[in-house]
Image: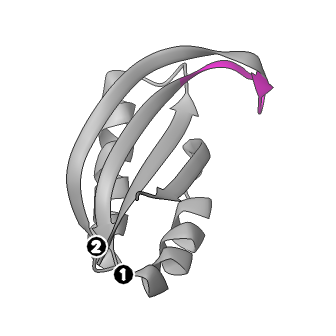
Amino acid sequence: MRNYQLTAVMSGKATPAKKKSVQGKIEKIITDTKGKSVKIDDWGKIDFTYPIKRNSAGIFLNFELELEPAKTKELDSKLKLEEDIIRYLLVRKE
């Protein structure tokens, strides 16, 4: 297993309940792809430099996880289907 860092951005207009729901969905996607979530950081609401999908701010969630390299494409395809996530970035940690 390798270490990865996943940063997900959702709309800045999302409620705390919606944020918790999306966080739970992402954790479930990680466990469904045989991964393990090590640490979760809530970076809070951050203003964008330019609008993304008509949003001027976003709520950032950062996940440190362990995952098999072959499962990254599966994780990627499942994250694309989540409507509440505006953007995300999955990066392998050294």
Quadrant for the C terminus, please.
bottom left
SS for tag 2?
Answer: loop
The answer to the question of whether label 2 and label 1 lie on touching residues, with beta carbons closer than 8 A, is yes
Tell me the kind of residue under disc 1.
Glu
**On the image, numbered disc 2 is attached to which residue?**
35
Task: Reply above or below: 75 against 47.
Answer: below
Vertical placement of 60 versus 82: above or below? above
Query: Whole-percent x and y of residue 35?
Result: 28, 73
The residue to which callout 1 is attached is 68
Name which residue lies at 38% across and 34% down: 18
* Residue 46, numbered circle: none
Q: CA distance from mark 2 to mark 1?
A: 7 Å
Which region of the structure is painted magenta?
51-58
Q: Nearer the viewer, mark 2 or mark 1?
A: 1
Q: Position of residue 43 (x, y in %)?
A: 38, 24
SS class of the residue under badge 1?
loop
Name the residue type under label 2: Gly
Q: Quadrant of residue 73?
A: bottom right
Q: Residue furthest bottom?
A: 70
Q: How is the image coloured?
A: one colour
At a point 48% along the width and 71% down the height, the residue shown is 75
Label 1 neighbour load within 10 Å: few <14, some 14-19, many 20+: some
Q: Is residue 73 left or right of residue 38?
A: right
